[in-house]
């Protein structure tokens, strides 16, 4: 068994699961003021994901930790070359967590309104930056023997922006569906209606992304070499179409499940296209960071594999238990009666 491939697959799975889970929190945060017409609605939205949002961050930490331990060279150069956007991303996630906690500490309209906008912006910016970052990784960074030759503005290239918009729209629809599933009454109906409305621009951006990827990246090369992997993007496309069909049938819960599959499929499509690269060079393939030239020693990978096969299932079982524990819909009455609610 090639442990380099094992850890590449695990690396991709960790990122995909993180985007699936934190994606609905980022999406609901972006739509916080659109869906929340009053303070009660906004508290319900926050408390719908309140018990689970910080647990979702574990997958981000684990994905970063897996990169550090399994592919330390990639980790070091990625955090060096992309230092500024990653720092902005980190600040956005910090502000988002602070906003959830601080919003209800005071009753003033100005206080809560300010934190409401902080939630919106600190959800939108990370979603956009995640997409821009992965878009640039898919297309390759300008790297050679002298290092990285790009800049922050260079990352905001057309393909990076399209990738960023794709992530924003995926998470927005995902978040609207989650709110529809987790709330009741008019708020739930409005969230479901908004998900239908946002699905159209999501489809347009997805089509643009798939077409642009053919010209801006080499992601499709692996699919030409091994057509069997085409099942992954086809599942993603099918799930995206399924979201709208299920919404039309009035089944928001199943539509949310289809949205989960869509996000997993989108990330999986990109990861498969990258293999064996982690960060390809847009200047010369000789300088690309791959799973082989940037990995830890075989001994380290063996130890990590043992640890991962023990603890990853435990984390998965724990997350299943948490989501089952907090599976009930959130109501305005329950939030008002709970002094520990957000």
Image (tube, rainbow, N blue to C red):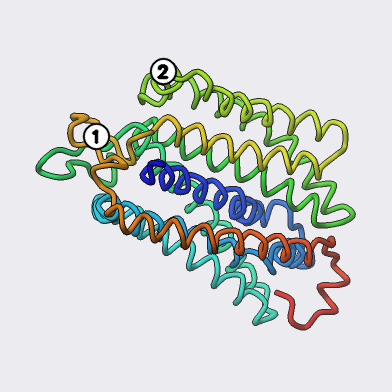
Q: Is residue 70 left or right of residue 249?
A: left
Q: Is residue 109 left or right of residue 324?
A: left
> Looking at the picture, how far across and down is residue 98, in whole percent?
54, 73
Circle 2 is placed at which residue position?
225
Is residue 42 visible to us here?
A: no
x and y percentages locating residue 335 in the rendered image: 81, 73
Q: Residue furthest front?
A: 1
Q: In the rendered image, which quarter contains the C terminus?
A: bottom right
Front label number (1 vs 2): 2
Residue 41: % across, % down: 78, 62
Question: Pointer 1: what residue?
Answer: 281
Q: Earlier in the sequence, mark 1 or mark 2?
A: 2
- Identified at 32% across, 36% down, the residue is 277
Distance CA(mark 1)–CA(mark 2): 20 Å
Q: Residue at x 28, y 47 (%)?
A: 152
Q: Is residue 123 above or below residue 135?
A: below
Element under disc 1 = loop
Q: Is residue 140 above or below residue 303?
A: above
Tell me the tag on residue 44: none
């Amino acid at each position: 068994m090639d442990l380099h491939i094992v850890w590449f697959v695990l690396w991709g799975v960790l990122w995909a699961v993180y985007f699936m889970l934190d994606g609905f929190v980022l999406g609901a945060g972006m739509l916080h003021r659109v869906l929340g017409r009053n303070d009660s609605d906004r508290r319900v939205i926050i408390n719908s994901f309140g018990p689970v949002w910080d647990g979702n961050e574990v997958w981000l930490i684990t994905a970063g930790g897996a990169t550090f331990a399994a592919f330390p060279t990639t980790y070091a150069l990625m955090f060096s070359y992309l230092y500024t956007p990653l720092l902005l991303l980190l600040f956005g996630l910090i502000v988002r967590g602070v906003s959830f906690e601080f919003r209800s500490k005071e009753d003033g309209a100005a206080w809560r309104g300010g934190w409401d906008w902080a939630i919106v912006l600190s959800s939108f910016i990370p979603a956009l930056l995640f997409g821009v970052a992965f878009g640039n990784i898919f297309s390759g960074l300008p790297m050679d023997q002298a290092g990285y030759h790009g800049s922050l503005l260079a990352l905001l290239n057309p393909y990076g922006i399209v990738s960023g918009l794709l992530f924003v729209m995926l998470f927005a629809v995902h978040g609207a569906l989650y709110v529809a599933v987790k709330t009741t009454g008019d708020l739930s109906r409005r969230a479901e209606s908004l998900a239908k409305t946002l699905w159209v621009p999501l489809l347009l951006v997805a089509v643009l992304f798939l077409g642009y990827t053919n010209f801006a990246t080499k992601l499709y090369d692996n699919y030409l070499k091994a057509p069997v992997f085409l099942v992954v993007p086809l599942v993603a496309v099918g799930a995206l179409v399924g979201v709208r069909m299920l919404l039309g049938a009035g089944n928001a819960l199943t539509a949310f499940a289809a949205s989960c599959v869509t996000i997993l499929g989108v990330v999986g499509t990109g990861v498969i296209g990258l293999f064996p690269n982690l960060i390809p060079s847009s200047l010369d393939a000789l300088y690309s960071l791959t799973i082989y030239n940037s990995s830890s020693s075989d001994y380290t990978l063996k130890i990590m594999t043992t640890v991962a096969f023990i603890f990853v299932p435990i984390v998965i079982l724990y997350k299943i238990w948490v989501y089952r524990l907090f599976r009930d819909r959130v109501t305005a009455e329950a939030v008002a009666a709970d002094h520990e609610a957000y």
